[in-house]
Amino acid sequence: MSQALPDDAPPIHDLIGIGFGPSNVAMALALSEHNAGVGRQEAVTAHFFERQPVFGWHRGMLIDDATMQVSFLKDLVTLRNPASEYSFLCYLRSKGRLIDFVNHKNLFPLRAEFHDYLEWAAAKVDDMVSYGHEVVAVTPVVRDGVVEYVDVTARAGGETVVHRARNLVIGTGLRPRMPDGVERGDRIWHNSDLLKKVDALTASDPARFVVVGAGQSAAENVAYLHRRFPGAEVCAVFSRYGYSPADDSSFANRIFDPAAVDEYYAAPEPVKRKLMGYHGNTNYSVVDIDLIDDLYREAYREKVLGTERLRFLNVSRVTGVEETEDGVRVTVTSLVTGEDSALDADVVVYATGYSPADPLGVLGELAGRCALDEHGRVRVERDYRLATGSGVRCGIYLQGGTEHTHGITSSLLSNTAVRVGEILDSIIGRGRHAALGDRAGAGQRAGSIG
């Protein structure tokens, strides 16, 4: 027997999004475009919750001269809808910079400019989002023994709100990753904190920084701190001989193509591992060659002039950090000799990457209904929907955390526009299928009464 919904039940959305970073902003833009082209009966209703008070994306790394590593054409909409009014080119036109950008002859805008584009796009759909709301619970709503909806509880200050949805789109982004046993603090930072914390050091005249890591963020941190603090020594520590260049050649970039997602998803597990091994150097622990050249040129210039502030402690790793009364004692171990050396620094910056948020962490008791593979990872359908048992009818979609099933673009901008279109098509298609099933069931029941 069906459980009737109470009179005070919250309104039912077609989808609720958790998080409002670039992926779910792109989702909202796709919804807006879809709804503008259909009648009211076919419109998809949605709401998003974002715990930040305003839109923000890696604000701590908006270094003034840092550029994007992805073409502006891989914005939030263009690969899904090249005619979209929400494209980066439309943003440039609205800012009066379109011709200037074209004359610049560059596919890679400043990161600060792209962030401004993301803010501009998010503002276009801000009627769909509640900022300053942290999702604290997801509760299944069961009818006829099946999870038909989810109730999403979000908290803002001391108040909570509850929204009900037929589908959930989780876009909670990435979490800064620190080495085991190392905690962030006043003098031990993750690179995501850089710009937020660095201003407090201006008056203290720091003498030495240690930057740990071999990727793009690490190299950018080294260059920025070296420029920002002309009296300080900057020590880069990594286990390689030097920074490795990113492979952004045309053929290698095919790993980011939408078609590559289909191929990766269909590939056997051993092939998936090989593909990640072959093409990890398009994204992980690699640096733009121009930045590598700039850093080497500066290090050589300082060596010639006898003013070496830029130091590279290669084939080494940081094996100990201890905050002292006025700094940090860093232990650096040579991988060749095993010899330890101590450095006293004002700040240690760990550019050690990010990890996807646990997609099951927000689902509460519903997490137990999600299927796992033999490695304990969530099973994800091709349409980015979590695989669940037959007792779950509502859709739970992931934007991120799907690298093991969908490949390297899981948490990158490269495929965002296409991915949200696929998720939207899935939600609409499954909704129509359910509606047809409901009508067929109603007809059968009506026939049996006669």
Image (cartoon, rainbow, N blue to C red):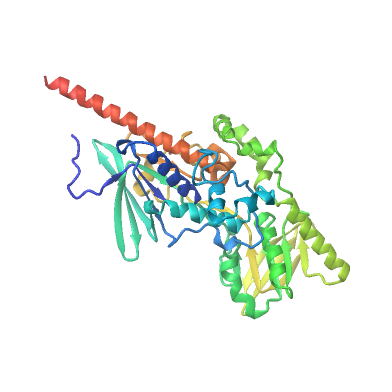
Up/down of 338 relative to 71, above or below:
below
Quadrant of res 238: bottom right
- Residue visible at 68% across and 50% down in the picture: 103
Q: Nearer the viewer, residue 383 or 66?
A: 66
Q: Foreground residue, 348 or 154?
A: 154
Nearer-the-camera pick, 216 or 31: 31
In this rendering, would 417 be left or right of 250?
A: left
Residue positioned 65% across, 68% down in the render: 348
In this rendering, the answer to whether 191 lies above or below 323 is: above
Residue 126 image position (x, y, % from top left) = 40, 54
Q: Residue 424 appears at what percent x and percent y?
A: 42, 38
Residue at 35% x, 40% y is: 44
Residue at (37, 53) in percent of width and height: 127
User: Which residue is nearer to you in this view: 291 or 347?
Assistant: 291
Residue 187 in the image: x percent, y percent? Answer: 60, 71
Residue 352 appears in the rendering: yes
